[in-house]
Structure formats: C-alpha cells, structure tokens
C-alpha cells in the first residue's frame, strides 16, 4: 500500500516549463550558444541540469550557471500550479498520505512558489520541501530515510527519466506524468510503473 509520495516540482506540480525554457534560452545567449526550439529543449532536456548545459558546450561551473539562470528566471513572470493539482493533493492528504517535494528547482524559488500556490498553506500538504537537489539519484536515499519513508510504501511522481531512475535506485514505485519536460516516448524508456 502506498503511504508516502515524493513529488517532483517543475512540470509535475508547477507549470513552469515555458518560463524555464525562456530562461534557459537567456542562459544560452549569455554563453553564446545557439537557441533551440521548445520541442528541441523537451527532447534534449537532461538532469542533472549541468549535464544538459554540457551537451550544448556550456562549460561553466554550477555556481555560475545557477547565478545566470537566477538572474533571468523571475523576469518571465510567475509559474502557476498545473490544473487539478491542489484537488489531488487534498484527496491524498485526506486519505492520510504523507508527501514531500524533491526538486532541482532552487530552494528559494520552490519556497516562494509553494507559498503563492497554496496561500501559505503548503505545510498542510507537504512534510518538507527539498529544493536545490542537483542529483536526485544521489540524494533520494538519504532524503527518504530522513523523513522515515519506507521504500516499499513510497511512490515518486515526476516528469523526467531522472525522477524515475532515482525512484528505481532505492526501490520506490514510480509514476511518470506527461505534463512537463519530457515526452511520453522518452519517459517510457525509464520504465515507470505507472504513466
């Protein structure tokens, strides 16, 4: 029985793909890399995001890349919750499920968005918000241990192969959503339990 859920944020709960894409194109401009289309972005996107940058010849350190991204991100507006997310979270909470967020999204952006999305009430849904997680495969074991989630009773829900492979690594059930960064055919290759 699933008692716990680990949610990715971007593309899973938050509809920030257009904003992140626009920001990454500003990052490309900064490093003098040719822009790509949104479809090309979705087909090439990789986590950890430093791997994605390297695919396009951006050889900056993580701090520099993070600073360039942060400089532009809020200039494209503010993301919205994906439709129906709050109703799903309410049903899960009413059913006694424990939930956390595990995201590569910067911690300060994650906290700010959670406050806005849920009118300051995100603590009623999520036990914790873990942001700025560069590599979920490396972090997930200690994160679920730290919140006392038993792997066999826990599902990770995300929109990238990285989310799914992180779940597989520690024996979680995995669910891929099609609302975000990666197309169905790419997600299918990660072999999620549910789509």
Image (cartoon, rainbow, N blue to C red):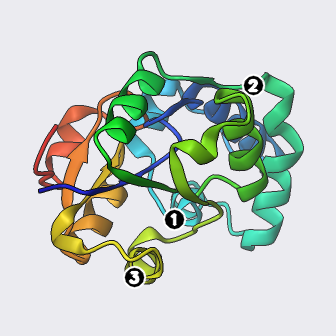
Q: Which mark is residue 51?
A: 1
**Which tag is nearer the camera, tag 3 or tag 2?**
3
Closer to the camera in the image, 174 or 178: 174
Classify mark 2: helix, strand or loop: loop
Q: Earlier in the sequence, mark 3 or mark 2?
A: 2
What whole-number distance in Å separates the C-alpha atoms at marks 2 and 1? 26 Å
User: Do the residues bearing badges 3 and 1 touch, measured as CB atoms within 8 Å?
Assistant: no
Q: Is residue 105 left or right of residue 194?
A: right
Image quadrant containing the N terminus: bottom left
**Which tag is nearer the camera, tag 3 or tag 1?**
3
Q: Residues within 10 Å of mark 3 (few under 14, many from 20)?
A: few
Residue farthest top in this picture: 83
Splitting the image into 4 quarters, where does residue 113 fall? Answer: top right
Residue beneath the point at 42% across and 45% down:
44
Q: Which mark is residue 78?
A: 2
Q: Position of residue 195 (x, y in %)?
A: 16, 37
Q: Position of residue 88 (x, y in %)?
A: 36, 28
Q: Is residue 84 visible?
A: yes
Q: Earlier in the sequence, mark 3 or mark 1?
A: 1
Residue beneath the point at 71% across and 55% down:
106
Classify mark 1: helix, strand or loop: helix
Q: Earlier in the sequence, mark 2 or mark 1?
A: 1
Q: Residues within 10 Å of mark 1 (few under 14, many from 20)?
A: some
Classify mark 3: helix, strand or loop: helix
Residue beneath the point at 32% across and 50% down:
97
Q: Where does label 3 land, which residue?
A: 145
Q: Position of residue 166 (x, y in %)?
A: 32, 68
Closer to the camera in the image, 52 or 1: 1
Tally the marks: 3
What whole-number distance in Å separates the C-alpha atoms at marks 3 and 1? 27 Å
What whole-number distance in Å separates the C-alpha atoms at marks 3 and 2? 33 Å
């Amino acid at each position: 029985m699933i008692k716990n859920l680990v949610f990715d944020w971007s593309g899973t709960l938050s509809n920030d793909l257009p904003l992140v894409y626009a920001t990454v194109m500003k990052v490309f401009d900064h490093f003098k890399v040719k822009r790509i289309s949104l479809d090309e972005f979705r087909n090439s996107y990789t986590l950890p995001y430093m791997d994605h940058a390297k695919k396009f010849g951006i050889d900056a350190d993580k701090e520099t890349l993070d600073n360039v991204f942060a400089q532009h991100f809020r200039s494209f507006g503010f993301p919205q919750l994906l439709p129906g997310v709050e109703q799903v979270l309410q049903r899960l909470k009413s059913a006694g499920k424990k939930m956390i967020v595990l995201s590569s999204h910067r911690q300060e952006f994650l906290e700010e968005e959670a406050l806005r999305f849920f009118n300051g009430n995100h603590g009623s849904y999520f036990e914790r918000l873990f942001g700025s997680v560069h590599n979920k495969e490396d972090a997930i074991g200690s994160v679920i241990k730290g919140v006392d989630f038993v792997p066999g009773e826990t599902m990770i829900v995300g929109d990238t192969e990285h989310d799914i492979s992180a779940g597989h690594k520690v024996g979680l059930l995995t669910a891929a959503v099609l609302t975000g960064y990666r197309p169905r055919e790419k997600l299918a290759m990660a072999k999620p339990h549910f789509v």
